[in-house]
Amino acid sequence: MTIRVLPPALAARIAAGEVIERPASVVKELVENSLDAGATRISVEVIDGGKTLIRVVDNGGGIHFDEAATAFERFATSKIDENSDLMGISTLGFRGEALPSIASVSRAELTSFVAGQDAGVRASVEFGGPVAVESVGAPAGTAFVVRELFRNTPARLKFLGSAGTEFGRVHQVVATYALTRPDVAFSLVADGGERFATPGRGVLLEAAASVYGWHVARELLEIEASAIERPSSAFAVRGLTSTPGLTRGNRNYMTIAVNGRWVESRRLLFAIEQAYHGFLSERRYPVSVLLLKVPPGDVDVNVHPAKTEVRFLREQVVFAEVQRAVRAVLLAAAPVPAHQATAPQPPANPAWPENPLWFARGMSSTPTPPVDTPDRTSQSGQEAGTARQEERPTPGRSLPVLRVIGQAHDTYLLAEGPNGVYLIDQHAAHERVLFEEIRARLGRPAEGGQQLLAPESVQLLPHQERILNEQGQVLKEAGFDVEPFGPRTAIVRAVPRVLAGVSGADALVRLLDSLADGSGTSGWRERVLATIACHSAVRAGRRMTVEEGQELVRKLETVEQPHTCPHGRPTMVYLSISALERDFGRH
Ligand code: ADP
Ligand code: MG
């Protein structure tokens, strides 16, 4: 084949592949253009997750009549020129690629009006064809409509997810910008229903409440720019991050912006996770919004056409500052002095804080005191030697009758049995008991559910709504009485009896999140039950009286599988009398 330069329309379509992958990428580019145009109000509307229609309307500076056609040309931009320093870019766009890319794979139309001009402009392009320009009346600002995305690129079209999946991604983009720019009023409408709207008053917490709901916002701690020890440095972190009491099962709730640009940085996400070390259990993630200010010359945004990847000149510094800023607010808000969170000392004040989870996680970073006896393997029932066989706790289903003596480390119940001593993990044991209790009542919601005093409404994110729709029946069997109430809202009337006392709305949202995240192979029913049990079981770190402990152990004695929690962790370890006698040299 002869070597030829590709015709511009085809070249644009190939290039579009890098910038425009799915409806969410169109939304991202258009929202960025609106922000660059100085808009203070941006509304995003999609139909079928953006597959049928995407509309972004702003009140920004607008596009002049004479320039409308040029805007659709490749590498046409008003944001940089030949003298610009690519390392110091302050606008979100600069590559001049978005509009031609979008127009090459859709029916695109822009309507714009620049204040003070006589008339507005409408320009439209169909699948990379010629630009048609006409003069129209229009409100100040720009409206962009994109229809039939990827109709001319069937391969791309095939790779799109369902309308629900694509909407989930659109939601994430708009939510992210709404959080990144609380000074701009964003609204998101899907298939005619409003999903959220932020007030745009510059208050980050207000924006977070609009996007995530107040039940999340009230658990967010504020990171002030002043939390940085060296305010003189051009580097600053501010934002919000959740108390360890509010966690999510995935990283979708961690938003990072650098100089107003949303970035996807695994390194920085990891820095946040590191800051929570010892506060959160594995595979739980906080809700965070971090707005970073970095000297413009210190960050390179021209790494990838989608511009969400950035490179930092001093990555280590950025990483360390993020970690420190987040850690600082966590420790400041923690109910125990910082040194106690990492040193194995009993707290000076034996009264436990309101939120037991918080404390439990804090203490879980405590190094366990050495309990290394030569017999540790047989205690956990791991050793296969036949001589030990009779020393094991009764194998199989039943437990011997146990007498609770006390509690160690506010986490383990200490009990005496006929042939030895048992250490029982109170959380794991309670999980098992609750799991079997709920399972026994399954399908009898009247018995399993506890009516809330007043029905509570709860705002749902798309993935939560999806799980609720798909697994509504299982949730109902388990005792939830939940009803859809408008597009992103549900009304909770009853919760499983074991969750009573926890707020209904919180319980449901946390459950839906855990379920959305889980990749377990076991059936949905088991997962729902195990998750409910886990959320309602007594936490490690909660002091229990001997009577409470005895009550729990009584129940454990009656369950079918007392030796493991629903996730398969052991509920107890066993020290046989003969092992003790040997260790103390009695035999
Ligand atoms: P870039 O954003 O990289 O400059 P785009 O292809 O996204 O390139 O946009 C091309 C140009 O069109 C922009 O530089 C800007 O001048 C103009 N433009 C696009 N969208 C808007 C908008 N919503 N309001 C005002 N001008 C816009
Ligand atoms: Mg742009």
Image (spheres, rainbow, N blue to C red):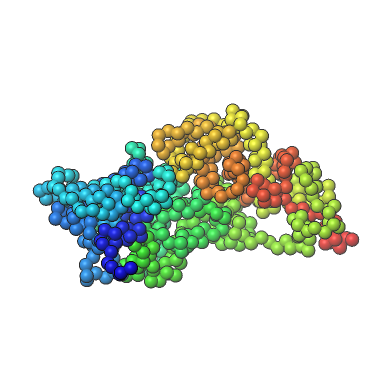
Asked if residue 281 is positioned above or below residue 85 in the image, the reply reads above
Q: Residue at x 60, y 56 (%)?
A: 363
Q: In the figure, residue 485 lies in which quadrant?
A: top left
Q: Position of residue 479 (x, y in %)?
A: 57, 33
Asked if residue 576 is positioned above or below residue 401 in the image, the reply reads below
Q: Residue at x 65, y 40 (%)?
A: 434
Q: Is residue 494 left or right of residue 460?
A: right
Q: Residue at x 57, y 54 (%)?
A: 281
Q: Is residue 451 left or right of residue 215?
A: right
- Mark yes or no: residue 413 visible: no
Q: Position of residue 370 (x, y in %)?
A: 70, 63
Q: Residue at x 31, y 58 (%)?
A: 13
Q: Residue furthest right?
A: 587
**118, 342: nearer the viewer:** 118
Q: Position of residue 264 (x, y in %)?
A: 41, 59
User: How many discs mark residues in the rendered view?
Assistant: 0
Q: Residue furthest front?
A: 1
Q: Position of residue 557 (x, y in %)?
A: 75, 41
**117, 253: nearer the viewer:** 117
**136, 150: nearer the viewer:** 150
**246, 87: nearer the viewer:** 87
User: In which quadrant will I find the C terminus?
Assistant: bottom right
- Mark yes or no: residue 249 visible: yes
Q: Is residue 88 left or right of residue 250?
A: left
Q: Residue furthest left?
A: 118
User: In which quadrant will I find the N terminus?
Assistant: bottom left
